[in-house]
Image (cartoon, helix red, strand yellow):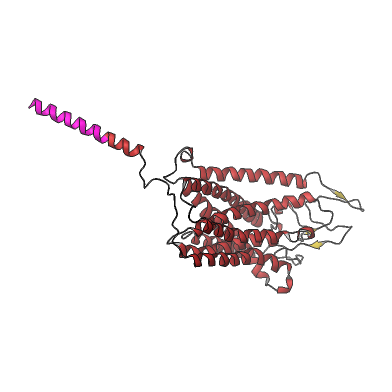
């Protein structure tokens, strides 16, 4: 009996050792299912993919360029409420894009099971987005300081005016900047100035509720205003490039992605285009918003064409692609989170002198339209 117990003990110990060895081998040797794929899901349909280049281009052009064109060409007689809707709808789109279409995919890419090394030891997507937000804040802090600090100009009557205030020049007739309209309680707002039309809008006290650009306005002030616009442009373009590459090599989900991305790029372009249209561009830079709109409009189609050209070698699920895509999506997410929450929400609604004097109906309408844009863009995140 003792021999049997000893034999059972030996067999059990050997079985436990064998099981432990097998478990160690499984953990230390990654299976083929856990490895990053070295190919893509491209399944043909070249004609439909080529058509996507032009359809997405048209939608992106309409969203990013048409608001600028319509604002500068009043002969089109686009109703004022259309600009109002486009502006706040676009703000909601940008905010939803930051969280649903950028931060979430970045987290997914940088936590993919096939990745190894330091990238797996920290929540890098959120960390990179956080660092981006602080870098942007510091950049705008410096831009605002050097665009307003120490700059005053004396007039013949002895009055000194700070550039952060909108005032009439005694030396040249003022020109009213192209801004989006917003009805307010007072009738003195004849220009239809939209609140928060630049990222320093909260620091500008509007004596006559008109935003005017004078010939002697410091160039640093213009540079500070452009900071936010170029930051937004950078964020949406990098996101659009990866969207195009993904669509080019997608598989069975191509048809769904095709339809969704047409709306996605159009709405996102509308968010950018409405900001470009609301920015007070000087005459010397009157074509800049068109070039910025065109750069956005062509980003996804060009990336899609490139993706089709390298469809036999591009692997969106490889380690390199996942890390690059995740890092740039995280940066873009930080950019749009900062732009959306600070520039488009806080400055537009809370720090705007005109919005404070607007009727409650106008404020609630703007908020509702912004929620609609965010809701529709978030819904698109179910498919893309």
Residue at horizontal 64 percent and vertical 69 percent from the top = 82
Between 169 and 58, the one lying in front of the other is 58
Q: Position of residue 80 (x, y in %)?
A: 68, 70
> Is the residue 370 above or below the residue 99 in the image?
below
User: Does the magenta segment cover residue 101?
Assistant: no
Between 174 and 23, the one lying in front of the other is 23
- Residue 172 falls in which quadrant of the image? bottom right
User: Does the magenta segment cover residue 11?
Assistant: yes
Q: Residue furthest right?
A: 156
Between 299 and 331, the one lying in front of the other is 299
Would you say residue 304 is visible in this rendering? Answer: yes
Q: Residue furthest top?
A: 2
The prevailing secondary structure element of the residues shown in magenta is helix
Find the magenta span and give its range.
Answer: 1-19
Between 243 and 31, the one lying in front of the other is 31
Residue at horizontal 44 percent and vertical 43 percent from the top = 115
Q: Position of residue 238 (x, y in %)?
A: 59, 53
Q: Position of residue 323 (x, y in %)?
A: 51, 45
Residue at horizontal 53 percent and vertical 61 percent from the top = 377
Q: Position of residue 368 (x, y in %)?
A: 57, 63
> Is the residue 51 above or below the residue 97 in the image?
below
- Residue 6 appears left or right of 19: left
């Amino acid at each position: 009996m003792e021999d049997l117990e000893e034999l059972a003990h030996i067999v059990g110990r050997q079985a436990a050792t064998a099981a432990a060895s097998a478990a160690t081998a499984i953990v230390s040797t990654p299976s083929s299912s856990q490895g990053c794929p070295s190919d893509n899901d491209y399944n043909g349909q070249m004609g439909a993919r080529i058509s996507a280049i032009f359809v997405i281009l048209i939608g992106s052009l309409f969203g990013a360029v048409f608001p600028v064109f319509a604002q500068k060409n009043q002969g089109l007689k686009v109703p004022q409420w259309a600009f109002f809707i486009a502006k706040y709808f676009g703000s909601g789109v940008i905010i939803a894009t930051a969280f649903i279409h950028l931060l979430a995919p970045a987290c997914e890419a940088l936590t993919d099971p096939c990745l190894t090394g330091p990238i797996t030891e920290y929540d890098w997507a959120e960390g990179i987005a956080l660092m981006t937000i602080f870098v942007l804040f510091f950049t705008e802090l410096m831009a605002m300081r050097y665009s307003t600090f120490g700059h005053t100009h004396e007039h013949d009557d002895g009055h000194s005016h700070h550039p952060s205030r909108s005032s009439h020049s005694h030396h040249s007739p003022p020109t009213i900047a192209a801004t989006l309209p917003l009805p307010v309680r007072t009738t003195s707002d004849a220009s239809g100035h939209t609140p928060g039309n630049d990222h320093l809008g909260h620091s500008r006290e509007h004596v006559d509720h008109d935003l005017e650009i004078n010939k002697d306005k410091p160039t640093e002030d213009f540079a500070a205003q452009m900071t936010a616009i170029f930051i937004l442009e950078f964020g949406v373009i990098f996101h659009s490039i990866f969207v195009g590459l993904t669509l080019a090599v997608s598989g069975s989900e191509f048809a769904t992605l095709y339809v969704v991305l047409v709306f996605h790029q159009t709405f996102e372009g509308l968010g950018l285009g409405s900001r470009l249209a609301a920015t007070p561009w000087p005459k010397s830079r009157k074509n800049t918003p068109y070039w910025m709109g065109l750069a956005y409009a062509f980003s996804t189609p060009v990336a899609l064409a490139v993706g089709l050209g390298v469809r036999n070698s591009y692997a969106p699920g490889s380690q390199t692609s996942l890390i690059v895509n995740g890092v740039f999506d995280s940066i873009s997410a930080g950019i749009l989170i900062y732009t959306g929450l600070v520039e488009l929400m806080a400055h537009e609604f809370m720090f705007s002198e005109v919005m404070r004097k607007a009727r409650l109906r106008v404020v609630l309408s703007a908020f509702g339209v912004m929620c609609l844009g965010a809701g529709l863009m978030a819904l698109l995140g179910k498919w893309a």
